[in-house]
Amino acid sequence: MQIDINRGILARQRLNYIFKELFRKSIHICSSFVPFFLGIAYWPVIAGLVILVSFYSVCEFLRLKGKTIPLISKITEIAARKRDENKFVLGPVTLVFGILLAALFLPLDCARVGIFALSFGDGFASLGGKFIGKITIPGAHGKTVAGSLTCFTAVFIATFCCCHLCLVSLLVAIFAMLIEVLPLADFDNLLIPISIGFIFKILTGLL
């Protein structure tokens, strides 16, 4: 009986973990719509992102003081990882700032590639690494070969859809995979869009 109860608890914990990861990374992947909206109304979208991250930050500070904000606090609770418990959940802030950096300092076509690398590459890498990854990469804080290969594939496809240049897409995907594997925690959200967008800009100028 006790064994069955323990199995049931473990199964519920596993399902809860899977739900959290899917929910968290669905937010990540949904950021891929930002370049489309930037192309329609650039400055209103930039202003909207700044307002959004400011509002979220205020809600997080209030949550840490024990004040529940309807909907926002619940979303944070669902999306937060174990390492974020009782802390300011930084992921959404670095996600938005990474997108803003790429959008403000790069041409839109380059920013698009950088944002897609964050949305699809980093997003699917996490899912692939956690759900099918078995072989870990030394020194990468638990990141897996499967996750890195998933990142490479997602960035290659996304970049190729943007530029239709196979060599450029291949090189961009390699750089994205190398950056994603670094143990940067949430700060990869800042580095990936601007660095991959800049690399794409250089490569398309050279090749």
Image: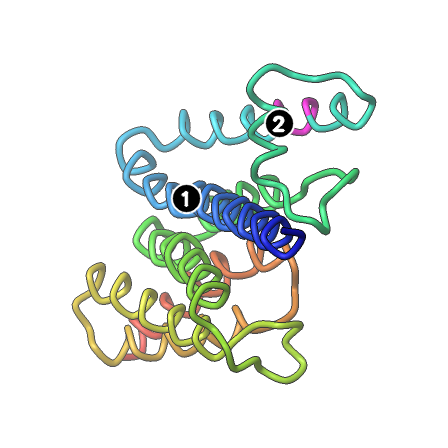
State the predominant SS element of the stretch in magenta.
Answer: helix
Say whether residue 30 is left or right of residue 11. left
Judging from the image, what secondary structure is the residue with disc 2 in? helix
Residue extent of the magenta highlight: 54-59
Residue 135 is situated, as x and y percent measured from the top left of the image, at: 52, 82
Residue 36 is situated, as x and y percent measured from the top left of the image, at 28, 39
Type of residue at label 1?
A: Ser
Q: Position of residue 155 (x, y in %)?
A: 34, 66
Up the image or down, 12 lies above or below 67; here it is below
* Picture layout, residue 124 above or below residue 140: above
Residue that badge 1 annotates: 26
Judged from the image, the secondary structure of the residue bearing numbered disc 1 is helix
- Ranked by sequence position, the earlier of labels 2 and 1 is 1
Q: Which amino acid type corresponds to the residue marked 2 in the rendered image?
A: Tyr
**Most foreground residue, 112 or 151:** 151
The residue that appears at 46% across and 41% down in the rendered structure is 23
Q: Residue furthest bottom?
A: 138
Q: Residues within 10 Å of mark 2 (few under 14, many from 20)?
A: some
Q: Which mark is residue 56?
A: 2
Q: Residue at x 55, y 54 (%)?
A: 189
Looking at the image, which residue is at 19% across and 61% down? 161
